[in-house]
Amino acid sequence: MAVAPGGRGYYVLRADGEVDAYGAPNYGSATTSALGGGVTATGVAVDPRTGGYWVLLSDGSVFAFHAPFRGEVHIPSGGWGQYPATVAIAALPNGRGYDILRADGQVVSFGGVTHGSLAGQLHYGATAPVVAVALAVDPVTQGYWIASSNGAVTGFDVPGPSARRVQDVGGGAGDPVTAMAALADGLGYDVVTARGQVVQGSTSGVVRSLGETLSSPGASVSALAVDPVTGGYYVGLDATGFGGYANPLRGVNALVPQEIDQGVDYCGSGPVYAVGEGIVVNVYSPGWPSGVFISYRLVSGPAVGRYVYVAEDVTPEVHLGERVGASTIVGVVHDAKTCMETGWADPPSRFAFAAGHSQFDGRNSTAFGLNFSALLVRLGARPGLPQPYGSPGSLPASWPTW
């Protein structure tokens, strides 16, 4: 989210690049054709001079709408897993451009000065990852704060302590920090978590909770913007549910998308929810890392009758025959080398299989994996990374698409 100059409305960015304007002029959106495989829109920032805005994609691309184009980050194909994605963009208050944040904590400035970064200081890897998630520029000094997935906020050329933590009221497993915004008076910032906990950090070093805002089951908060006139704030509630389904990865802390193969691989830690209403049919398979292969049959929605699995380094929280819903935690992923995998499963049999197992040759993305990644994106999750090796195969004619 981003507020128009003078507090005259605000903009909401969708993962597919679409910009919705509320009380402010709409100057355009990033076209879906510009988003390649594994790419999503990750940030919007308003130019204080023109009132236009910039849209950032995870591959570093920047689209300018009624605002001057200042430059972009060139990230090789692969995005998140191999090359840290761009996750946030913040306009410079002096109107000279914008700063861009990458998931490894690197900051690239276009039109301003790079005051420092967390590059090389965060553990951006498969085991126990910590990622940068949000950026806010101080309107007084033009310095900035970076929020990390572990609840830490680090300041560069801003008044007050250079580092502090908000994890006591957010940023823990199951409630990751998702967004932040600078206060218009230059006295600090607001941070919000996925469950809607809003925390304010002041330049004096005081950190205080502003309360809960989330009330919709299955939803998560993904955006925050401060009104420069009132000092209040807007919170973006991602309730991108579809057909009774919800984002199953909304509670995973430091979520780092990996490759798409039989399903979609992710690293991080925290709870994994069911996609929608279903019945658990399997919790174990010796052929998978850690012996975990949780699968459940969906009993409602557009994929009714299909089976979903969650496997690898996950501790099951459900048992055979249990009925689950979009608010049910089916397992907890922990920080281990193989991370987790989720996707479409075959019906239960003597052995538990992913639906795409017969299409998988060891390096390719299967049609089933690509389809499940598309569903996750529809529900508000980060996409997995398509692999360029080999044919994906095809889906049955009756399979739902997203």
Image (cartoon, rainbow, N blue to C red):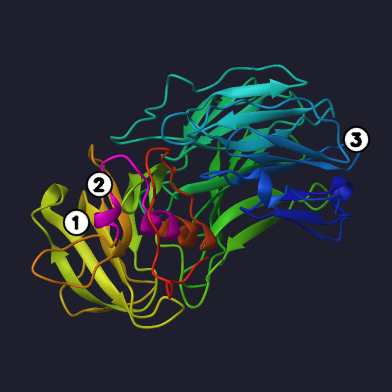
Q: Nearer the viewer, residue 159 or 315?
A: 315
Q: Residues within 10 Å of mark 3 (few under 14, many from 20)?
A: some
Viewer can see residue 322 = yes
Give the percent coordinates (x, y) of residue 166. 47, 42
Q: Residues within 10 Å of mark 2 (few under 14, many from 20)?
A: many
Residue 282 image-quadrant placement: bottom left
> x and y percent of residue 184 in the render?
77, 40
Q: In the structure shown, which secondary structural element does the residue marked by tag 1 occupy? A: strand
Q: Is residue 261 above or below residue 241?
A: above
The amino acid at mark 2 is His
Tell me what residue is drawn at x 88 percent, y 41 percent.
66
Labels 2 and 3: the sequence-earlier one: 3
Residue 42 left/right relative to 127: right
Q: Residue 197: where, in percent of width, then height?
A: 52, 56
Asked if labels 2 and 1 touch by Cβ distance under 8 angstroms, the answer is yes
- Left or right: 109 in relation to 378: right
Give percent across and percent down for residue 317: 21, 65
Q: Is residue 187 visible?
A: no
Whether the residues at callouts 3 and 1 have beta carbons within 8 Å, the answer is: no
